[in-house]
Image (cartoon, rainbow, N blue to C red):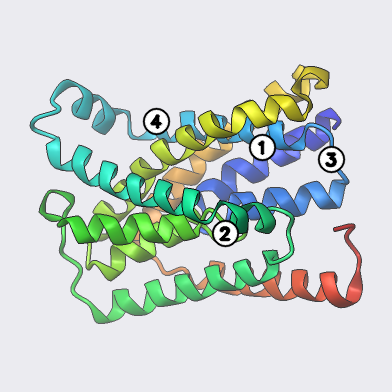
Amino acid sequence: MNFIEAIILGLVQGLCEFLPISSSGHLLLMQNIFGINEGGYFFSVMLHLGTLIAVMIVYRKRILEMLLHPVKQAKYWLWLIVATIITVAMAVAFKDIIDEAGEGRVLGYCFLLTAVLLLICDMMRKRFDCSLTVPNMKWYHAALIGFVQGIAILPGISRSGSTITGATLCKMKKDDAAEFSFLLSIPAILGGAVLELPDAFREGAANIDWLPVIAGVVVAGISGYFAVRFMIKLITKHSFKGFIIYTALLGIFVILDQNVLHLINW
């Protein structure tokens, strides 16, 4: 992997982690386009850590409040834990399916599923009076959001898109849905990195040129910061129409390429 490829992949990760288009799906797609095999898994884990820093900076006030006043913020802690447990349980239960999906065989269909989820989210917003706040959530609201986040472990299914859709189905306020979704990304990214780093190092991290890795992580963090800011405004004021069209077309292209066109080396 050269320096330019690392920069491009860092930008893709930073933008796609928080935009509702699936960072894991785009990284898998770009790695196949560039023909990156050696060190690709390790690099992906490192890029996710870059975006973790971005969301922690954006929500630093809420995170600090949760750390300094855990009793007062008990509902935030409780519902984040419940949602995370559901996600982890799904990751463990369906590990074989997730590993197989990581090869890209169902990537196109997962992009299409993202488009469907975003369409559902837009439709629900128009029909429902969304007024639920995080402190007023029930356990089944957190469980539903954790469940859809578990589905989003598959490459091509957007984590942010899925969790915001889940929150919307719970009739959650737009700004609360955005905040809960992005806060939920912290244990998801951190936990995934902790679990994946040993395998990533065994994959060949010792032979990696660290300069491109560091550059990619920095770019992922910076672009991720602006992507979170953009998404907060988008969620509260606009629809997902553009992202619905984009992920649908991308899904169709990937399916066609894997079965007919063969432009990319899968």
Q: Residue 218, how many percent across, how many down?
A: 62, 26
Q: Gap in Å between the C-alphas at discs 3 and 4?
A: 30 Å
> For residue 254, which quarter of the picture?
bottom right
Q: Earlier in the sequence, mark 1 or mark 3?
A: 3
| Residue 120 drawn at (x, y percent) | 41, 76
Which residue has dot 4 on it?
56
Q: Earlier in the sequence, mark 1 or mark 2?
A: 2
- Identify the residue at image location x=88%, y=60%: 264
Element assignment for label 3? loop
Closest to the observer, 135 or 90? 90
For marks 4 and 2 on the same chain, the one whose residue lies earlier in the sequence = 2
Q: Which mark is residue 21?
A: 2
Cα–Cα span, label 1 and label 3: 11 Å
- Residue 244 relative to residue 8: left or right: left
Tag nearer the camera, 3 or 2: 3
Name the quadrant of the C terminus: bottom right
Q: Circle 3 sits on which residue? A: 37
| Element on which disc 1 rests | helix
Q: Residue at x 70, y 24 (%)?
A: 201
Q: Are marks 1 and 2 in contact (CB under 8 Å)?
A: no
- Residue carrying label 1: 44
Q: Give residue 100's position: percent from left, percent from top.
A: 68, 57
Q: Nearer the viewer, residue 220 or 96?
A: 96
